[in-house]
Amino acid sequence: GEDVEQSLFLSVREGDSSVINCTYTDSSSTYLYWYKQEPGAGLQLLTYIFSNMDMKQDQRLTVLLNKKDKHLSLRIADTQTGNSAIYFCAESNNNDMRFGAGTRLTVKP
Amino acid sequence: DADVTQTPRNRITKTGKRIMLECSQTKGHDRMYWYRQDPGLGLRLIYYSFDVKDINKGEISDGYSVSRQAQAKFSLSLESAIPNQTALYFCATSWGTEAFFGQGTRLTVV
């Protein structure tokens, strides 16, 4: 089946930039997403990018998509302790939505 | 009120018991999903439904069944629960680009 892969852990210092990477295999992906999960909560959509775009910026969040390499990244500028959470990459081909295992971001003061 | 409500939020059940997890949504979306979350594995799709008459298996449907009782309701059943079905279960609904998730049901099978 199609896969979405991301590293499980990332630790940064407060104020630094965080970059979370994701690779996927489905070449028919239409949308790619980043979701955030805080402890005890469901997933909340952070941002998404359409597959014909290569970059999207939303305040401190920058999403880069390299469709040729099937690589998606999420950059959080000036990371704060409140950004500590699990971040899920997901892709959709208009049928189902497939998720990566999630990257646990820890922000140290 | 939450857009997607799951009940119960927590449940402990014994091996071999039948259990139903319920989900209702107020978004008015046609698409609904059930996922399970396991540490290190992310979310894996169990079943999804694009409307009341449409039910599709996801990647890990064995041991599960679903019922789409109405546009707003999508329930997940474990006919005979087993310990490796211990997980956090999420219901979601979507239309277009965004999926909205429930708070999750933590199920423990002992």
Image: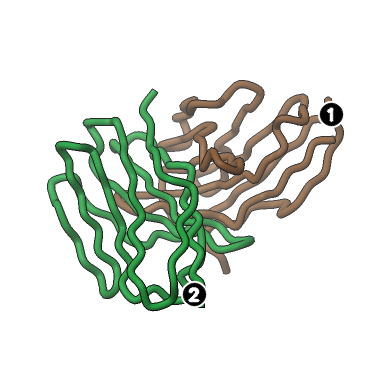
Chain colours: A green, B brown
Residue A57 drawn at (x, y percent)? 21, 66
Name the residue type under label 1.
Thr
**Mark 2 closeness class: few <14, some 14–19, many ≥20 residues within 10 Å:** few
On screen, residue A58 versus residue A11, left or right, reads left
* Label drawn at residue A82: 2
Q: What residue appears at the point 46 percent right and 49 percent down from the top-left corner?
A: B93
Q: Which residue is disc 1 drawn over?
A: B15
- Residue at the image position 77 percent from the left and 27 percent from the top: B82
Q: Is residue B60 above or below residue A53?
A: above
Q: Give the position of the N terminus of chain B as an image quadrant.
A: bottom right
Bin the neighbour count of mark 1 within 10 Å (Cα to Cα): few under 14, some 14-19, many 20 and up.
Answer: some
> In which quadrant of the rendered view does residue A76 lie?
bottom left
List x then y, in percent, for residue A85: 51, 62
Which of A13 and B83 lies nearest the eye of the viewer?
A13
What's the CA distance linking mark 1 and mark 2?
39 Å
Percent x, y for residue B70?
A: 54, 42
Q: Is residue A1 above or below residue B46?
A: above
